Image (cartoon, rainbow, N blue to C red):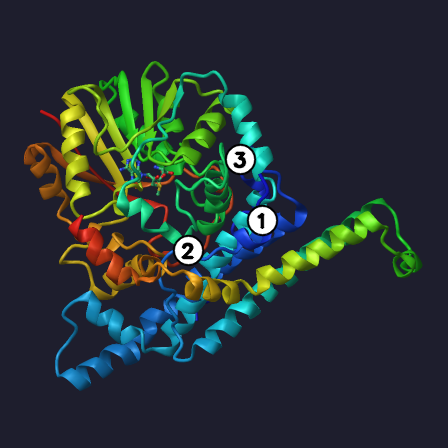
Amino acid sequence: MNQAPINVPPAWHRIGKHEVAPEASHDEIARFNFLSNLNKYLATMVSPGNRIAFDKRVRPRFRREKGRDFENRREVREAMLRDPHFQTWSALRRAAMEMRQQAGRSLVLRQAKQLAEKAERLNAGKDTLQLNPNLTIPPYIAKVDNHLMPGSYHTELFEGDVSAAANYDMGLFVTTGGALGRFNDGGGKAIAQWLLSHHPEFKPKHILDIGCGLGHNVLPIAQAYPDAEVIAIDVGAPMLRYGHARAQAMGITNVKFIQMDGQYTGFPDESFDWIQTTMFLHETSGKSIYGIMKEIYRMLKPSGLTMHIEQPQYTPEMDLYEQFIRDWDAFYNNEPFWSKMHDIDTLELMTQAGFKAENFFQIGVRAVNDNEDHTKPRAPEPEDHGRAAVWNVFGAWKK
Amino acid sequence: MEINDIVLANSKAKGKRPYFFDDAAVERVLNITMAVAGELAVVHERLDTIERLLEAKGTLSRADIEAYRPDPKSEEERQRWHAAYIARILRIVQQEMEAIRDENPENNRTMDEVADELEQI
Ligand SMILES: C[S@@+](CC[C@H](N)C(=O)[O-])C[C@H]1O[C@@H](n2cnc3c(N)ncnc32)[C@H](O)[C@@H]1O
């Protein structure tokens, strides 16, 4: 049993407010508070039992029966699926993810029309929002409701709908227990700070963010480089409508939101100094990920930079149990490309696109979290695999 | 634009739902129980707010509470609250129904199956 004192997650009312955000009632906030605490409890108190079950009974039994050890994480998963503790944790974690969607959707859908109107008021007449209703939604988005989000990023329940984005905006704080900061922008802040401090000489004028969603992580980049022209693209119109309105409401006006497929943008060759993706590549697919990287290479200026924020890749050195537990979301939280994506050799992905191996790099970054009270000591706690606000960033300079 | 927000809030995501327990019935009951647990926490938080406010600002008599009868508007609001409450708790039953009803087998595949396809496209 984990005996460390529990670090309670911040209550939901601390979430950063902006003009397009939905109204939340006392009960809706309380429902989110319950779910953040449930997630925290499952991650810190119940999940460690999986490792114990693995070491004490699942692995010994497999060895006994097969006369050998596990050879890959699929074998680990098949064996763990028969373990009662893993079943309980998985069933509860799945329920928590479904309940989080339910809570976000019930909050947002009851005021869907008002939200669309709020966004429209901020968006009307602005050339910094460009939608393309004829865009083909890529099959890996159209066919999959990623992380159990009914209707994915692109579905509109009526014209002008922004509910998918509003639901995402309100619920992320719950899933991550506030670990990404009040505006869920801890990843964008971390990468901007890293670049400013490690490459002060780099002064990007044209920046592209692919798969921007509602712009959580691109806004800190736009703020860090206020003289840059930033273009944020996504395939989902609700994300862009809401994201643009949110940026306007927050007074950040150097970002253009455009509905486009990152694999086929139509931007001229060598248009950008910096092309960023954040928690995006794992929601693409086996061929398109290579296509997108080629498109990035094409669009980058000479001496340009590209970086990609993701959870850690699986490497042959990574313990099979760790690979298996990090893979849970792939199968049970509707992230079907997650597993394959984290197996890809990122160096090979970049060199196939045209980057030179010597210009490839990887770094680790940790979310900049304005929810953390640095005056209070925090108890150490086990990692919430697949959700932790600590990432692997890989990238390359085009030289 | 009229949407049924109560039903839509509960929508099933595409993909065949994994059941971790040998008997799906156990998992169904677990889901219902967890939803009830959540709603109990919601009520607890609300009562806690009320108690703290009452303590800070003054009192309210128990007789007032016992004598209260909702006017028609409040009655409608309260009955709708019950409808949403029950739908929320029985979410999994609705989603299992959606899975049966959805004729498109594409939307009831396991993520293993979708992963195989995504690898190819
Ligand atoms: C997990 S979200 C990440 C959002 C954002 N980058 C963040 O950090 O919060 C992935 C986003 O990528 C978008 N997307 C998926 N495929 C895309 C493509 N081919 N081109 C542009 N956007 C895409 C989705 O619509 C979704 O909004």
Left or right relative to A322: residue B47: right
A152 and A327: which is toward the camera: A152
Looking at the image, is mark 2 or mark 3 nearer the viewer? 2
Q: Name the residue rendered at 43%, 68% in the picture.
A: A91
As drawn, the residue found furthest toward the front would be B103
Left or right relative to B33: residue A151: left
Left or right relative to A277: residue A371: right
The residue beneath circle 3 is A16
| Callout 2: chain | B
Residue B5's disc number? 1
Quarter occupied by residue A81:
bottom left
The residue beneath circle 2 is B13
Spot occupied by residue A249 in the image (x, y as percentages of width and height): 52, 24
B1 and A210: which is toward the camera: B1
Q: Residues within 10 Å of mark 1 (few under 14, many from 20)?
A: some
Disc 3 residue type? Gly
Query: Does A95 appear above or below A344?
Result: below
Q: Residues within 10 Å of mark 2 (few under 14, many from 20)?
A: many
B69 and A230: which is toward the camera: B69
| Callout 3: chain | A
Q: Name the residue rendered at 55%, 23% in the picture.
A: A121
**Residue A41 visible from this viewpoint:** yes
Spot occupied by residue A235 in the image (x, y as percentages of width and height): 33, 35
Residue A206's disc number? none
Quadrant the N terminus of chain A occupies: bottom left
Q: Secondary structure at mark 2?
A: loop
Spot occupied by residue A266 in the image (x, y as percentages of width and height): 21, 24
Disc 1 residue type? Asp
Q: Quadrant of ligand 1?
A: top left
Whole-angstrom CA distance, mark 2 to mark 1, is 16 Å
Q: Name the residue rendered at 50%, 65% in the picture.
A: B92
Query: Does A76 appear above or below A255?
Result: below
